[in-house]
Image: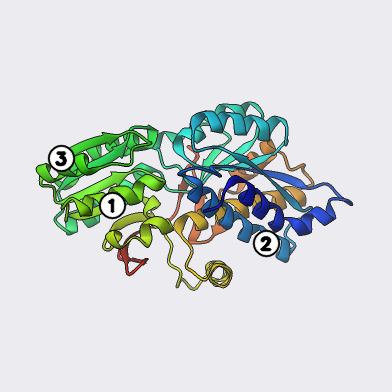
Amino acid sequence: MLNRRSLLAATAATLAAPRILRAQESAYVVGTLFPMAGPNAEYGTIFTNGIQLAAEHVRADGILKKPIEIRAQDSQATPQGGAVGMTKLANVDKASYVMLGFTGVSKAAAPIGTRSKVMMINGGGVGPDLAGLSPYFWNVIPLANQEVQALLPWLKQQNLSRIALIYVDDPLGNGILQQLKESLPGIGGSLAGSFSIPPATQQFAAIAARVRDTKPDAVYFASYGAQQAQIVKQLRDNGVSQQILTYSSGSIPSVVTLPESEGLVFTSQASDWSAADPLTQRFVTDWRAKHNADPTSYNQNYYNAMRLFALLAQGLEKANKPVTGENLREELLRVRRFPLVGGEGNFGDEGTMSMPMQINRIQGGSFQKIA
């Protein structure tokens, strides 16, 4: 797990080549607003690694006339950290494009970025209320309502109708609670029970006992960070043997490699690493060579977020327009569809992106598409 100092150093190392060029020409300033320390630092590392690979590809392909300089701020995965970090990126670093994650962070940062006309790209938060959050806020990840809808046909096929939900008491968890309440009756299902947990909780034996008492067909958890692995482990340690389900956060290494996660099912955007399209194959091949492992959905998201900036900026360069947040937004609205890892991303008016979805199962310390 990277701490704040090593994460900043890694970002600087990736951009060493562009820094040489800045003596001769200005750079495009792009910001990141991720947790870099504490229980959610794993996400900061995952997100940043995806961005770094995309930046390397952009530079190698000579897509842009100017180099990219990335400025990193620590969101601490909190609304306060999101507000402070976005203020610095917008007013001090003068970033025109900021990549961020986490629902609470995004909601706190969005008004600040909007006032400064900074284009904001989320590849990690899935709260349904991130749709339409701001004219300058866009998602390259399916939101919770999209993930829940993708799971429903599989639940019906597997005859999993009574679902127990463990959810963190914040915008993410409450959003997924609402989606399950609204959606399960449509397939003849219901919530067997719903159990809220504070974001910092790490002890779940009592919750596991309450889940057992509901006798559900499956257990869905909506959480993030170090909490996820503890939920899975303690459910299994306390006798909950039913199918465990979650959203795309199930792809992070601390969950995938946990022995108790064997068989866990999670939804994500299309992440078929055997896909034949050249963009996906280059991403997967270079990722495996660099990290000696398969990428996660979040690596994919933030690779796409960085690639999206390059495509938008390239369009503005061709039109002889300055690369500003306002112009980046206008270019996205003009084009709408972009070739990305996993398939074509199609951006709608509410700041959401349509992309093929899939269902994955964790097996033997990795995950495979099952539907």
Q: Earlier in the sequence, mark 3 or mark 2?
A: 2
Instruction: Give the CA separation, mark 3 to mark 2.
Output: 49 Å
Residue pictured at 21% horizontal, 48% vertical: 219
Q: Position of residue 234 (x, y in %)?
A: 25, 50
Q: Is residue 140 visible?
A: no
Q: Callout 1: 10 Å neighbours few (<14), some, many (20+)?
A: many
Kindly report which numbered mark, 3 or 2, lies closer to the viewer in this rendering.
3
Q: Earlier in the sequence, mark 1 or mark 3?
A: 3
> Residue 121 appears in which quarter of the rendering?
top right
Q: Which mark is residue 49?
A: none
Q: Amino acid at mark 2?
A: Glu
> Residue 256 appears in which quarter of the rendering?
bottom left
> Residue lying farthest right?
24
The residue singled out by tag 1 in the image is 232
Q: Which mark is residue 56?
A: 2
Pick whichever, 264 or 41, lies toward us. 41
| Residue 130 placement, left or right of 207 | right
Q: Callout 2: 10 Å neighbours few (<14), some, many (20+)?
A: some
Q: Look at the numbered discs 3 and 2 and tell me whether their residues touch, using CB distance below 8 Å.
A: no
Identify the coloring. rainbow
The residue singled out by tag 3 in the image is 210
Task: Name above or below for residue 307 compared with residue 353.
Answer: below
Q: Look at the numbered discs 1 and 2 and tell me whether their residues touch, using CB distance below 8 Å.
A: no
Task: Name above or below for residue 211 compared with residue 258.
Answer: above
Residue pictured at 10% horizontal, 47% vertical: 215
Residue pictured at 40% horizontal, 47% vertical: 226
| Residue 129 placement, left or right of 316 | left
Q: Is residue 339 visible?
A: yes
Q: Secondary structure at mark 1?
A: helix
Q: Position of residue 89 (x, y in %)?
A: 67, 35
Count of picture labels = 3
